[in-house]
Image (cartoon, coloured by chain):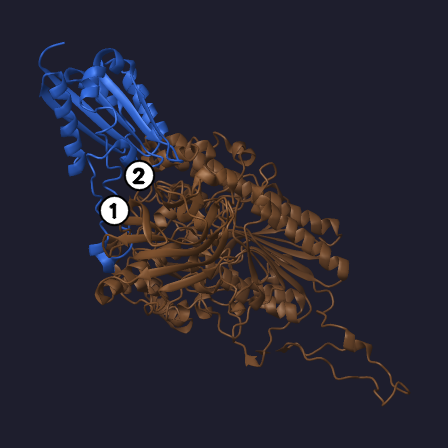
Chain colours: A brown, B blue
Amino acid sequence: MSQPDRSKLPIRQQPFGGVANRTLEGSQPDWAELGHVEPPDGAPNVLLVLIDDAGFGNAGTFGGPIDTPNYTRIAQEGVRYNRFHVTALCSPTRAALLTGRNSHAVGFGSVGEFSTGFAGYTAFVPDDCVPFPRILRDNGYSTAAFGKWHLTPDGQQGPSGPFDRWPVGWGFEYFYGFLGGGASQWDPCLAENQKIIGTPPEFYDEENPYYLPDAMADKTIEWLHAIRGQDAKKPFFAYFATGCSHAPHHVSEEWAAKYKSKFDQGWDRLREETFARQKALGVIPADAELTPRDDAFPAWDDVPEKLKAYYARQMEVYAGFSENADHNVGRVIDAIDELGELENTLVLWIWGDNGASMEGTITGSFNELTMQNGIPLSDEMQLQLAERYGGIEAWGNQMMDPHYSAAWAWAGNTPFQWGKQVGSHLGGTRNPLVVHWPERITDTGALRTHFTHAIDVGPTILDIAGIPMPTHIDGIEQQPMHGVTFADSLTDANAPERHTQQYFETIGNRSMYKDGWWLSMKTARIPWVLTPDALKPYAPGVWDPDSDPTELYYLPDDFTQARDLAAEHPEKVKELKELFWQEAEKYNVLPLMATLAAFFGMVPPLPETATYEFRGDVENVLSGMIPRIYNHSYTITAELVIPAGGAEGVIVAEADHLGGFSLFVDGGKLTHTYSMMGVFVFRQQAEEPLPEGEVTVRMQFAADAPKPATGGEVTLYVNDRPVGKGRMDHTVPIRFSGYAGMDIGRDNGGVVDLGYASRKPFAFTGTIKKVTFEVNPHASDAQEHELHAAAQHGHTAHALSA
Amino acid sequence: MKLHDTIDVLIGGYLSKDAAEEDYNAVLECGAHLQGAVIVSKDLEGNLSVEQTDHMVKEGAEGLGAVGFAVGLFAPPLLAATAVGAAIGAGAGALLHHEVSDKLGEQAGETIPIGGAGLIVAYSHPEAEKVEPAVTRAVKKAIGEAEGNHVKALKGAIADAQQKLAAGNA
């Protein structure tokens, strides 16, 4: 059978090859018309696994303290790559991974929530850079994605799409997961295919509660069984991107308890222990040096004794969470094995997309969104807030959205410096890769030292599948992929190293790699600090990137970037600096700092919408798409019908007790609860019950001043008559939640007011005809623009932590 | 009891009842003779609770009650130093330093935030070296001092502590 022309996609159906007369007399069917495109013979199944926010030194398979028996099993039956690279930020790595192209070149110099008007930072993949899952699909693969997506712009995550920026638009026939950068593992607001399906009903089963990592594996296995039930041969491509180990760090106590007291020695000692194991395992060279602690991280010995248990618990939960991810990936692999297909399934398992995340700042947090809302809390305050929500033993359960200390992340990036967001150093750019393919890999358990990068994964899969890079897709000429195949290195340790040059850039932190030399150009800003003083040096007209300090490393002799050779090789520094600028121009990296453009006054036009209407059956409006009530006066008006005997329940609620608001009726009285990130909780209640019949209720917030986090006065009205009031000294300046949705007529998932938690989702028992938000402009255009700029700054800050 | 005392009043603010109780117990066990100690907290459903030492009942109830010590004057401005939104950006520097207004004089039931707690300890000034080191977890703390007869000294010390809290120099 002749192979179809795969250079242009979709592959054209062959012309009818039968005979069609006026009647069946003499007519001959062409049964090939009923077929579908098939991939080249021998094209294997592919399972691509991506763990989130993890470092080179986390998994035990690479010497880390976390037990990862499945990762180790796969490594022992496959090969380990110890020089695999990523982009130092979530969305950019995912975009690079799935397009085979440099992230800036496909609009993802930054994260999916944050689009700005520069080509490298739009968060929109150009039509001439179609992702490779689409190529696999159009060549006859079944394709599906599970878990974290983080490639759909913030304002397009609803039922009106557009869906070319959802997983289906990237070539996935099935999707089950979440669109944002992080999600609760207990009550995520999920998407399935092209619909936001919200919190799973199993969340309400207290005896057997929902847990996303388990459900991801379940759904993947179901999907595998289903496609095999239909077609015994069609190869599959499954992209399994865990929410783990991104915050919130959610895992049941049975997993966290495995690590009880395992981190009491602190992060400094942990790095030493990990480093020793890495050498013993041979995953780093014997002559590698452990890089020292930067002053940005405190010494463990300087942590007050009374707080050490608080800090240690953070890492215990992170470790348990991570081991659970290993367990669930193992379940998927076992399911493939049970199908008898593991031999010819190419498994690529990347442990981390940007190094471990330092976004928890030094203190860590009971609620990761406190940082993103710019609320400075000391570690003692964080501990007390953790106590408020159940104590450190509850760190990891549904009552908190925790993130650990940046110092634990640094330890997880052993033996390297820094971590997530730092594109200048290996802590943020180098993660473990394991490849498993029993049918072809014979020197099992071996190590590969080839310089490889996320952009090489797509070309490698296509190469192995025998599928050419198409010249055209949907009639649009395609840009070539920037990555190169490393397929031959799977079976040949001496295969040539093809990836010899690579730029890196994340939020101004940048580097240039070429032929073993690595030039690091890190800004002086500490990654988790976005204060005005920290940003001033990078303002337009102030910052001269070429004046940033440079460090030069020769990686073949210096695996960890421990020996700075810049002073000894100024000519190499100059050469790589110039090469970086060339690459930056070529791949749309410019202008540097575009990720932070909002901080320097480059903000999108003011939104024109100030009134938002929702009918009574709207649910699961994602947190980035709710009315922009932040920092403004606003009203929420609801038109209700109260039946005889009264009604109770939620009229409208956003997010949960760790940040959100709820307007509800309890005990017959109109009530408003507002959680300022779980730090402050304000509640106002009417002094009299609602009347029966058609009733209009209103919550009015009158802001004190046009400023972020403004306080203000709340007044509750029934049929335009004031019935209650109260004050909110602080409001949320940026965002209530990274993942939880807004609902009319109920409070899905974790609830805002814990007083009705036992009745969740506390659905309204009357009728809600309409809920209207009206966001009031401030007195002057100048104030409005100033606030708009501030909101954009905050939005950017949130996005960077997503 | 002497006619004229120098009374100290320590007010501590907390984000959790656990932390306040830890200090409360530490104060009770520090070996100092206390005029009284009160812990006020509000749970996540908004329910207020008040605990006080036996000392207060045995020795100071009448006097303390007379000054409204237990509840009425308690209002530590928790997180007064918090600059909400401080990380929001260079372009809006003037907007970034959020001032928290103090609302002294309101009833504790209204001023103790949901989920928060407060501790008030009254003691003779010579006991300060025992009491003050025992209070280690307050996120906001102020110590007032006043002389006079018992009730007058208590009133003065409370007012002094609250003034220090309000001034943000606690």
| Residue A719 quadrant | bottom left
Residue A435: quarter of image: bottom right
Residue A389, x across and y down, in percent: 42, 35
Q: Disc 1 sits on a residue from what chain?
A: B
Query: Is the residue marked by circle 2 packed among few (<14), some (14-19), or many (20+) residues within 10 Å?
Result: some
Examine the rendering and report whether any part of residue A47 can be seen.
yes
Residue A453 pos. (x, y %): 51, 60
Q: Quadrant of the N terminus of chain A?
A: bottom right
In the image, residue A174 lies at what x, y percent?
62, 61
Q: Is residue A425 left or right of residue B108?
A: right
Q: Is residue B21 left or right of residue A64?
A: left
Which quarter of the rendering shows the C terminus of chain A? bottom left
* Residue at the spot of label 1: B83
In the foreground, B24 or A552: B24
Q: What kind of residue is marked 2?
A: Ser
What residue appears at the point 60 percent right and 69 percent down from the top-left corner? Answer: A134
Residue at image mark 2: A378
- A312 versus A424 height, above or below: above
Q: Are marks 2 and 1 in contact (CB under 8 Å)?
A: no
Disc nearest the viewer among 2 and 1: 1
Please say whether residue A397 is visible from this viewpoint.
Answer: no
Q: Amino acid at mark 1?
A: Ala
Compare residues B122 and A112 and report the one nearer the observer. Answer: B122
Query: Mark 1: few, some, or many residues within 10 Å (few <14, many ≥20)?
Result: some
At x 21%, y 65%, the residue is A780
